[in-house]
Amino acid sequence: MVMSVLRNISSGLRSLFRKERVGRELDEELNSFLEMAAEEKMNEGMSRKDALRAVRLERGNLEVTKEVVRTAGWEFLVETLWQDLRFAARMLRKSPGLTAVAVLTLALGIGANTAIFTVINAVMLRALPVQHPEQLVTVGNPSRVHSWGTGTPRTDVFSYPLYREMRDNNEVFSSVLASSNLGDLRITMEESGTETARGRLVTENYFQTLGVEALLGRTFTAGEDRIPGSDPLIVISYGYWQRRFSGDSSVIGRKVRLSNYPFTIIGVTPPGFFGEVVGDSPDLWAPMMMQPQLMPGRNFLESANDAALLLIGRLKPGVTVAQARANVNAVVKQALMGSLSARLSFDDRRAVQNMQIAVEVSPGSRGLSRLRHEFSTPLLLLMAMVVLVLLVACVNVANLMLARSAARQREIAVRFAIGAGPGRIVRQLLTESVLLACLGGALGMVLAHWGSTVLVNLANTSQSAGSPLSLGLDGRVLGFTAVICLSSVLAFGLAPALRFLHVKPGVALKEGAHYAEVRRKSGFGRVLISSQIALGVLVLVTAGLLVRSLRNLQEVDLGYSRDQLLLARVDFLQSGYKGAAVQNGLRELLDRLATLPGVRSVSASSNGLFSGDESSDAILIDGVAPANQQDNATADDEVGPNYFSTVGVPIILGREITQQDFLTAAHVAVVNETFAKFYFEERNPIGHKISIVDSDHPGQPPYEIVGVARGIHDHSVRDAVRRRMYAPLTSATFDELGAYNFEVRAAGDPQALLNSVRSTIQNLNSDLVVSDIRTAGELVSDTLASQALVAKLAAFFGALVLVLVCVGLYGSMAYSVAGRTREIGVRIALGAPREGLIWMVTHEVCVELAVGSVAGIFLAIAAARLFKAMLFGLSETDPLSIGLAFLALTGVCLAAAIVPVRRALRVDPIMALRYE
Amino acid sequence: MADKPSDLVQGTLDMLILKTLALEPMHGYGIAVRLEQMSQGVFRLNAGSLFVAFQRLQRAGLIRSEWKATENSRRAKYYALTDQGRKRLNSETREWGRQVAAIARILETS
């Protein structure tokens, strides 16, 4: 079977590429056939001439025979396809303008689709470049890749002791790794000073579990990572190696200092490997056991209350995800109730007993990602929009093709008349469409390559070097583009081609006039334009809703002024401060910053504003009986002196936390409005006492409420204000915070203070770790990154659609005016008024605009329900968005109509009547 | 008047060509003449269908070809059965016999 297929192919190829020789052989064979047949007849007494004619009568014309044999094999199909392709290329070259517009239009549509799909592929679909990614499962919430949680043990992120229990007691994984974010690390090299690098803390079996081998040197081995602090080794990424060390292979064995502790580089990972977190490519990996050295002052290795690890396990052969989930949950339950229980405080133990243990265990071939969680909905929304853009582009090209096919009526009729079947003609026309789509697709790929990079840069709010996402082309993206190209061929090429199935050659040839068909624009063409307008309205209304939502979000009243507010996070513990030195450093820095010129006031707090840090506590209030246990919890924050006046939060009742409170570590508290309403309703909360429930630190004096502050949006623009209590930073002596968020209120432009604030911090101690200094406005914008990305791109696609609709309308009107030149001439000659002419040219467009707009508005309102979660401060029937979309399209229609209308008015009746 | 030449039953030409070649290699014209003789003039073969069939059979590996001199010292392409062709001929002949017998039974009963 296989053999005969191969023989068929090779013989066909021979016919294709040795066409002449195969043809000669067939000629010779047929000739000898003819001669033999004739000879026999001649032997019967016929003359040679008669014999030859008799043979031809009996056996058929040998020329025809040759043709029949030649066209019987599959290679003939290839040959005609090649002919069709060459002819199509010739036809496209003959009308370069039309071809250019069509190709460019398709390239924009296909390019936008491929660009978005490339990003979707990288973020949501692609498997990690590791061995057998399908065997991996994630344990914990795969989007919490940057979380550090403290307090009652959790199961969305794991503590190290809990991981250890899992590693040693599970029955489903052949190996299970744990990893955690290290963030920006200070790295010091001998020859060049201190810089930062992104790090990830991993267990020693990390590379072995993923099945990733070092490109250079080695990765961690078992045994390392058993004793805390004993193996100061790091593996660096290929990108970092290239970027920082110019690919120098002597980097292996090099000593560097990380967080001021000496480490040795032992290996470089292969180029395709970006770690297990999609969208987070670390520069280096350090062993878990070095955590205390990398994060001085915080030892999490033995604490069951500090959770920061996400787990990835490799399933043993034959184990399903469901089995893994059951086993993981059993092990976690066993650990928390049994072996780890002794390490927990009384409250935690009770909490764990009441806790519903349901650890998330999911297929892990795509790795972990915060991006995936944040950007999935926006990306899918954008994907839907670009599909619409492509549809509009296809409608445009379909219109062009329709117009041109009408003009080619005569050519086609001639081809019918000389014997081409309808199938052959449709195939020829479709070949032209395929060629157009391929050209558009190729150009689109180039646009997409550039576009997806721009897209990622737009979405990326961190300022570190290197692309966070690897956007390679792979089979899936190529396949997607191919499918998109072919679907667009069907969308724009099929209808114009099929029209010719019913052409009657006689009629078409008789019509004579080139524009025979155009006099009456086909109903199909009008439907196309209406639907194009409807799609345009849909895209524009969507864009309008998203842009206006973003504006609403950006302009939300946070409860304080975000202008002239500078925020900086300084980590004293990480910088080697211990005990009382931490608070002394804090005080010193507050004093120094306050004296800077241009600074109006300074404060500090543990959670800060839009910092990502958040904390809460269980409380009891005298005279308030909570309805249930959940009501006991409140968000809290520890703040420095004059925090409220610095941030600009109005105090509604009582007073704020003062310098005096701060210096004396007074047990006083300010609560926010939400807190006051929740616990006290209309009563006055001042003077009541709040006790923090913490069995590890019993006997803490309660906090007396001294003021009520207005509720502010301090961590999220969208979410409702949570109830919160604020206490002086110095009062919670048992909480060794060590890292503080500084709030600096500037008298003028906060940007101008950036450098002086930074140098003030460095002057205090050049080893102080300062993570980014940003203005409050910037930080707030960062939390809106995905919203902003969608809004920007939606606006861009809206503009693109407008351009496409304009080009399409212009093309079809110009064409129709050209086709009706004679009619217009006659009308002018008969004295038709200008208004009448204008109406004649434009009334179709007016109807199309009206029909399309109404349909589009209904579609848009229906569609907006799907992404309601992304809207803010407006409803899906927002009249402004709808009105603007309608106005924009009307404007575009007008713009498209101007030139054709002027051309119609300028028709010279005499010339027009002589025309043709 | 003699019966007019009939068209072949669909799909049987290949089998007949194989049968013709079962005895000895032959050239195209020889095959045509032999088929007509054996059918006693019932089948008259058009050169087109004949040569398409040659191409098809050759590509299927059932026959092979070779240029040789004829008895009249003319050059002609001779076709010969391959092993695979011989097997195919046997199986098709058997199948044909079964079908003809079945059809005959149906026609007789009615």
Image: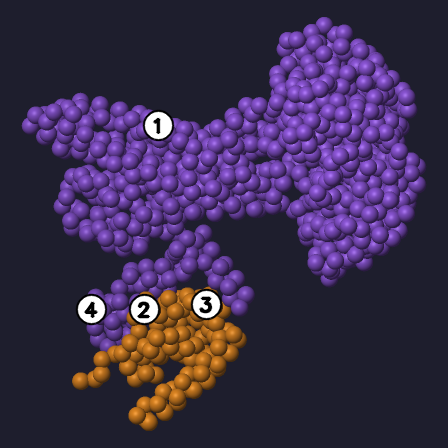
The residue labelled by disc 1 is: A887
Kindly identify the amino acid type of the residue bearing the numbered disc 4.
Answer: Asp
Mark 3: give few (<14), some (14-19) or many (20+) Cα within 10 Å.
many
Q: Residues within 10 Å of mark 2 (few under 14, many from 20)?
A: many
Q: Which chain is orange?
A: B
Provide residue A769's location: percent of width, then percent of height.
80, 22
Per the model, the C-alpha gap separating discs 1 and 2 is: 72 Å
Residue closer to the observer: A855 or A412: A855
Residue in the foreground of this view, choosing between A553 and A50: A553
Which numbered circle lies on residue A50?
4
Q: Residue A796: where, in percent of width, then height?
A: 47, 29
Q: Which of the 4 quarters of the picture holds residue A678?
A: top right
Q: Which residue is mark 2?
A: B47
Comparing labels 4 and 1, the label whose residue is closer to the camera:
1
Residue identifier under label 3: B58
Residue A434 horizontal/vertical position (percent):
40, 45
Quarter where residue B6 is shown: bottom left
Q: In the image, what residue type sits under mark 2?
A: Ala
**Chain at numbered mark 3:** B
